[in-house]
Image (cartoon, rainbow, N blue to C red):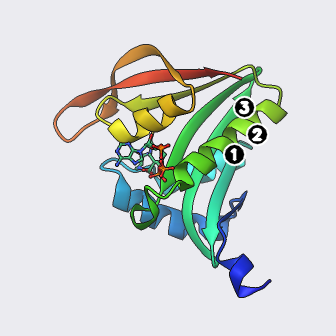
Amino acid sequence: MSALADSVPHIRAISEADIDQVMAIEASIYTHPWTRGNFLDSIKAGYTCHVMEVAGAVIGYGVLMLAAREAHLLNLSIARQWQHRGYGKSMLLHFIDASRRADALQMYLEVRLSNDVGRSLYASMGFFSVAVRPGYYPATHGREDAILMGLNL
Ligand SMILES: CC(C)(COP(=O)(O)OP(=O)(O)OC[C@H]1O[C@@H](n2cnc3c(N)ncnc32)[C@H](O)[C@@H]1OP(=O)(O)O)[C@@H](O)C(=O)NCCC(=O)NCCS
C-alpha cells in the first residue's frame, strides 16, 4: 500500500491483537471504561466490532449488536487526539450503513446526559430521544442518567 493510502483512515473488523490499543484509548477517554472482558465477550458473541485505523494505529472503534431486526450501538469511541475531525461521524455512518445492510429497522444507543458532544453527534444524524434510563451509568459521585436515543432506519 502507498504511504498516502496508508494515512487515510479505514475501518475494518477488530482482531484480538488490537485489544491493547483499544484498551489504552478506552482508559484515556472514559471515567468508567469497558474492560478487556467486555471487548472479548463482544467479539465472542459475534457483535460487529470494528476499528478505525490510520497508518497501522487504531484511532477509534465501535461495537454494534444486531438482533431481531434491531441494532444497538454499544460503544463508539475516537482517541482524544483524533476527536473533532469528523471521524466519529464517519464511524457512526459506517454502523448505520451496516445496520441497514443487516435489515435492521431501528437503531438504538445510550448516551450520558452530560455527554454534549455525543448527544449533538447523534442528533445531527437524525437520532431522537426515546427515554431516560435513570442511574444507568456509574459516575464519579453516584450514578448518571442515560438518554436512550433511536433512529428509524
Ligand atoms: C463522541 C465521539 C465519538 C465523537 O467523535 P468525533 O470524531 O470527536 O466527532 P466528529 O468530529 O465526527 O463530530 C461529529 C459531530 O459531533 C458534534 N461535535 C463534535 N465536536 C463537538 C464539540 N466540541 N462540541 C459540541 N459538539 C461537537 C457535532 O455535532 C459534530 O457534527 P458537525 O461536525 O457536523 O458539527 C468522540 O468525541 C468520543 O469518542 N468521545 C469520547 C467517548 C464518547 O463520548 N463516546 C460516545 C459514547 S455514547
Along the viewing direction, whichever of 106 and 145 lies nearer the viewer: 106
Residue 143, compared with residue 55, is above or below; it is: above
> How far apart are the two marked residues, 1 and 2, measured between alpha carbons?
6 Å
Q: Is residue 119 left or right of residue 57?
A: left
Image quarter (top left, top right, bottom left or bottom right) of the C terminus? top right
Q: Residues within 10 Å of mark 3 (few under 14, many from 20)?
A: some
Mark 3 / mark 1, whichever is N-terminal: 3
> In the rendered image, which residue does mark 3 sit on?
66
Q: Amino acid at mark 3?
A: Leu
Q: Is residue 130 left or right of residue 147?
A: right
Dot 3 falls on a residue whose secondary structure is strand
Residue annotated with mark 2: 98
The disc label shown at residue 45, or none: none
Tell me the tag on residue 94: 1
Label 1: how many residues lie within 10 Å, few (<14), some (14-19) or many (20+)? some
Q: Are marks 2 and 3 in contact (CB under 8 Å)?
A: yes
Residue at disc 2, secondary structure: helix
Callout 1: SS: helix
Q: Quadrant of residue 79?
A: bottom left
Q: Earlier in the sequence, mark 2 or mark 3?
A: 3
Q: CA distance from mark 3 to mark 1?
A: 14 Å
